[in-house]
Image (cartoon, rainbow, N blue to C red):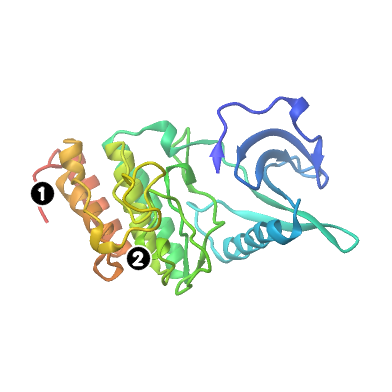
Amino acid sequence: MTTLPMPATMTQLPKEIDGYPILSLIGEGAFSKIYAAKDPKTRQLLALKHVIINDPKKDDRWVEQMESETRIANALDHPVLRKVFHFKRQRRWLKSLGAVMLMEFVDGRTLDVIKPDVQETIRIFIHLAQGLQHIEQLGFVHCDMKPINVLVTSNGDVKIIDLGQACESGTVKKRIQGTPGYMAPEQAHRREITPATDVYNLGATMYWVLCGRVIPTALPPRGQNNGLTTGAVEERFLKPPIPANEVNPDVPNIVAKTIQEAVDPDPARRITMSKFLERLEMAQGLLKSGNGQEFEI
């Protein structure tokens, strides 16, 4: 989802969707839009995700994805994860017209916009690791951690959003899903998805926040594969990223090493999410004590 810098004007907005008054457009993806809406009974502010089906043969999978997102979100309960309240397919007679999903409204900015310093980055990623650890403990994988899927509010609350690609651990997906520049090799090659996938995605995301660049991944962003391949890059050809503390000297050694271990192309060699969290909490304590760069692991 791409967060829009300004809400759409009222002339561009539907007056209501499925009985919910629409206030503004707050996000837009390839096949869906997210609006700020109001519950007509409680007056509660909500985020409303809307998918319209134009071609049932092609578009119904986006509705199925929303239905899966609702099911997984309802199985989870953690303050870092945005809540999903309701899902409804829109039909007319036997024809499927689309779907509506009602979610917790989060008044925040995405991680790519706020550009936090190193200490704040570590604080934010401690929360993210805690949320992803909860997902792992319930048997799921988020599968799409990236800067625009993290919201930070003005009072510092952190929210992981968009469970649209989440799945059960052990899933082998029928198509490539993920985001180039953050995607783990097993996603690019349609292999088994495990909690190690989220570790990779989280490490790649933290590297981008701290260094302002993506790591070399099996599916690079468009235009960044130097014309060597038109498909996914095999793991043996992947070079490790330049350590984060060599790109940004303010990054503590322990954090740089943790990221390197998180983005190992081999899932079996990656650091675990619990160890990722433990290292970040250690780094946070060291920075507060003024010894951030003196600790080696």
Q: Residue at x 19, y 38 (%)?
A: 247
Horizontal and vertical percent position of residue 94:
87, 64
Image quadrant assignment for residue 263: bottom left
Horizontal and vertical percent position of residue 189:
40, 65
Q: Between residue 134 and residue 250, name the one nearer to us.
A: 250
Question: Quarter holding the N terminus?
Answer: top right
Q: Between residue 172 and residue 284, name the one nearer to us.
A: 172
Q: Tell me: residue 83, above or below residue 45.
A: below
Query: Which disc number belongs to residue 240?
Result: none
Horizontal and vertical percent position of residue 281:
26, 52
Q: Which marked residue is nearer to the observer: mark 2 or mark 1?
A: 2
Residue that label 1 marks: 295
| Dot 1 amino acid type | Phe
Q: Is residue 104 left or right of residue 40?
A: left
**Distance Cα–Cα, label 2 vs label 1:** 26 Å
Query: Which class describes the residues within 10 Å of circle 2: few (<14), some (14-19), or many (20+)?
Result: many
Query: Which class describes the residues within 10 Å of circle 1: few (<14), some (14-19), or many (20+)?
Result: few
Question: Quarter holding the C terminus?
Answer: bottom left
Q: Residue at x 15, y 47 (%)?
A: 253
Horizontal and vertical percent position of residue 274:
31, 63
Q: Residue at x 37, y 32 (%)?
A: 115
Q: Secondary structure at mark 2?
A: helix
Among numbered discs 2 and 1, the one appearing first in the sequence: 2
Q: Is residue 205 left or right of residue 99?
A: left
| Dot 2 amino acid type | Ala
Query: Which disc number belongs to residue 196?
Result: 2
